[in-house]
Image (spheres, rainbow, N blue to C red):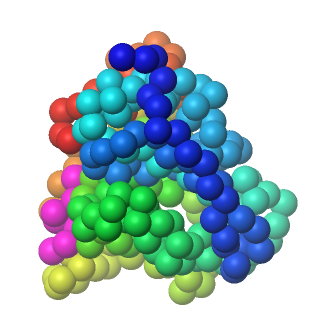
Amino acid sequence: MSDVPNQREVWSLPGASLNRELGVARWGHYGKPVILFPTGGADFLDVERFLMVRALAPLVEAGRIKVYAVDSVCRQGWLGDVAPREKVRLQAAYDEWLTTVLFPHIREDCGGTKQSFAVAGASLGAYQAWTAAARHPSQIDLCVGMSGTYLMDRRLDGYWDEDWYFHDPKQFLANLGEGELLESLRRVRFVLGLGERWENPTYTDAAAAVLDGKRIPVKVLRWRSPAGHDWPTWRTMLPSVLNAVV
């Protein structure tokens, strides 16, 4: 077995409402599609540069997962020098891109599969993962958030509108009543992990509390990694979680 899985392919997929193309890379030949969101300032290939793809190689080569690393809007929006309304607009446009461009592309690349996706991310990537899972439980059945930045209010300086409400799981999940969406969410597994150093546990605890309050399955992992909020922690955590549940 090679250290790095083969079947690597890279695409640039159109994002009309984002005014740019977004990069997507795939590793693997068979298995459950796992979508990896980048950390805040990163692009889609950081998972390769920081050896996450190598860490996932045994699962990829065994045909248990296919890894899809995608670009996000965190660098342009949440970390960018733009007005709060533009941050929200970019997030809403990104969510539309996921459902209308990325998800169909992955299903086609997987031979028309109808199976559910797993999503994962670290830091701001964890926000993208849990938001995607919270909004689209009919397509996603596993979310792994690592060292997550789930509370985004401080990045909006008090700004609020309806778009933001529906892209902030902390808000809309707390008010979600019984019905089809909540029943679908109760079939999704959320695993939220963090290390021991340079972390803000209040983010993870708040996200877990919202999920638990709606009886949505959530498990918090307090990983005993001296690396804390960094790639060595995440390279150990994600393969371990996926190996246990995929």
Quadrant where the image shows the C terminus: top left
Q: Position of residue 15 (x, y in %)?
A: 67, 72
On screen, residue 26 above or below 147: below
Q: Is residue 190 left or right of residue 12?
A: left
Chain part drawn in magenta: 183-191
Residue for point 26% across, 72% down: 138
Q: How many marks?
A: 0
Magenta residue check for 91: no
Q: Is residue 13 visible?
A: yes
> Furthest residue to the top?
226
> Furthest residue to the right?
81
Residue for point 63% across, 65% down: 13
Residue for point 54% across, 24% down: 51
Q: Is residue 228 visible?
A: no
Between residue 24 and residue 92, name the one nearer to us.
24
Q: Is residue 125 left or right of residue 103?
A: right
Question: Which image quadrant for residue 43?
Answer: top right
Question: Which image quadrant for residue 153?
Answer: bottom right
Residue for point 43% across, 71% down: 104
Q: Position of residue 228 (x, y in %)?
A: 49, 22
Between residue 120 and residue 149, name the one nearer to us.
120
Between residue 109 and residue 245, name the one nearer to us.
109
Quadrant where the image shows the N terminus: top left
Q: Position of residue 137 (x, y in %)?
A: 28, 69
